[in-house]
Image: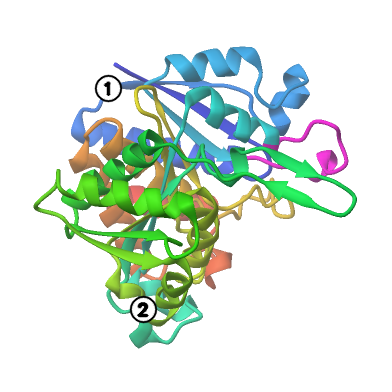
């Protein structure tokens, strides 16, 4: 019996979490996956319940879980507050040592018209961005004076090696190609990054490795995105490039993500926000949450059949023209969820 902690969070979070769990229940009935869920307060809901976005009992439950599902956090009422919901996300990443952020980028045929790129540019686009999440300049020393500022970008070989290995492991299950992105012609951290990447590549003779400088990679992600299979990079570059790549499908509503640790549970979540402007209206797009459930089944539980069933059901639903309002359709959250379950 697998234990899944659910963090519905704020805004549309509770609505899309309910949708994701409905689909999980339906696919588990087909495949025999045995699990139990435990709901905990997080984000603004955590502040409301316990005065902190990551309450102690939520953290304790997360640490003992086999996997964690997060829907969305953020609420306008905390915009000027001393403690913000987003601090909970940074805290749980640190506490669980979630060092690897995984973002699949796939273009659904039924949604190709939503992409800002020409159809021929996005044909065949299906890649994964692997971002190092707990090191680099975001976690270095920061100094701000009246007329100068300094940010320290630190990486150890061990930190680089584990994220590069993560990318190669993912590539083995895909098209066996890794693109490592750095700024080796300028930065010392990137020189070490490239050196370690080459060392790791020797351990995976069945996977090819190419290097790209971050500026040219940013250009290629728009001009020739189909060339990529697995992209791996450091924290700052990964933050920028994963957001750039999220534009390719033309909507954030169909993009899941995962964050992995070395030994503990992984966390799965949509990449979009809490959309407080439509919260409580029952019109939120649940697809990102549903696909996050599929990622959890595949990555944490090796339930590849269940994951594939969900992904195929989502693809079929979209191809049937069943779309939520953000995708140009009229289906509400419940109708979209019911359609996906029917297509299972």
Question: In which quadrant of the rendered view does residue 217 lie?
Answer: bottom left
Way the structure is coloured: rainbow
Name the element at disc 2.
Answer: helix
Specify whether residue 76 is painted magenta: yes
Which residue position holds label 1?
34
Residue 43 at x, y percent in the picture: 67, 32
Q: Residue at x 34, y 47 (%)?
A: 341
Q: Is residue 18 visible?
A: yes
In the rendered view, does 99 fall on the left or right side of 154? left
Front one among 196 and 112: 196
Magenta region, residue range: 73-86
257 w.r.t. 184: above or below: above
- The Cα atoms of the two marked residues, 1 and 2, are separated by 38 Å
Which quadrant holds the N terminus? top left
Q: Which mark is residue 14?
A: none
Position of 222 relative to 74 (above/below): below
Which residue matches tag 2?
Answer: 122
Say whether residue 56 is left or right of residue 182.
right
Residue at x 65% of width, y 40% of height: 73
């Amino acid at each position: 019996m697998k234990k899944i902690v659910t963090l519905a969070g704020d805004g549309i979070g509770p609505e899309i979490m309910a949708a994701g769990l409905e689909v999980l229940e339906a696919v588990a009935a087909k495949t025999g996956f045995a699990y139990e869920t435990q709901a905990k307060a997080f984000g603004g809901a955590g502040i409301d319940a316990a005065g902190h976005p990551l309450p102690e009992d939520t953290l304790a439950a997360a640490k003992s879980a086999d996997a964690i599902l997060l829907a969305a956090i953020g609420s306008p009422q905390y915009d000027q507050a001393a403690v913000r919901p987003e601090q909970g996300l940074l805290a749980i990443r640190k506490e669980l040592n979630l060092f690897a952020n995984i973002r699949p980028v796939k273009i659904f045929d039924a949604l190709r018209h939503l992409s800002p790129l020409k159809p021929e540019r996005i044909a065949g686009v299906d890649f994964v961005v692997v971002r190092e999440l707990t090191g680099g300049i975001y976690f270095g020393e920061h100094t701000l004076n009246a007329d100068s500022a300094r940010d320290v970008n630190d990486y150890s070989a061990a930190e680089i090696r584990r994220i590069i290995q993560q990318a190669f492991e993912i590539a083995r299950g895909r098209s066996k190609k890794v693109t490592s992105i750095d700024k080796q012609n300028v930065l010392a951290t990137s020189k070490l990054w490239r050196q370690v990447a080459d060392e790791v590549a020797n351990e995976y003779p069945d996977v090819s490795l190419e290097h790209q400088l971050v500026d040219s990679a940013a250009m290629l992600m728009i001009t020739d995105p189909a060339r990529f299979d697995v992209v791996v990079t450091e924290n700052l570059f990964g933050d920028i490039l994963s957001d750039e790549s999220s534009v390719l499908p033309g909507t954030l509503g169909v993009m899941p993500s995962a964050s992995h640790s070395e030994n503990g549970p992984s966390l799965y979540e949509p990449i979009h926000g809490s959309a407080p402007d439509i919260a409580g209206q029952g019109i939120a797009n649940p697809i990102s949450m549903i696909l996050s459930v599929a990622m959890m089944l595949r990555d944490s539980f090796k339930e590849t059949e269940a994951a594939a069933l969900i992904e195929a059901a989502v693809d079929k639903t979209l191809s049937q023209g069943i779309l939520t309002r953000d995708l140009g359709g009229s289906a509400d959250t419940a109708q979209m969820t019911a359609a996906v379950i029917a297509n299972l």
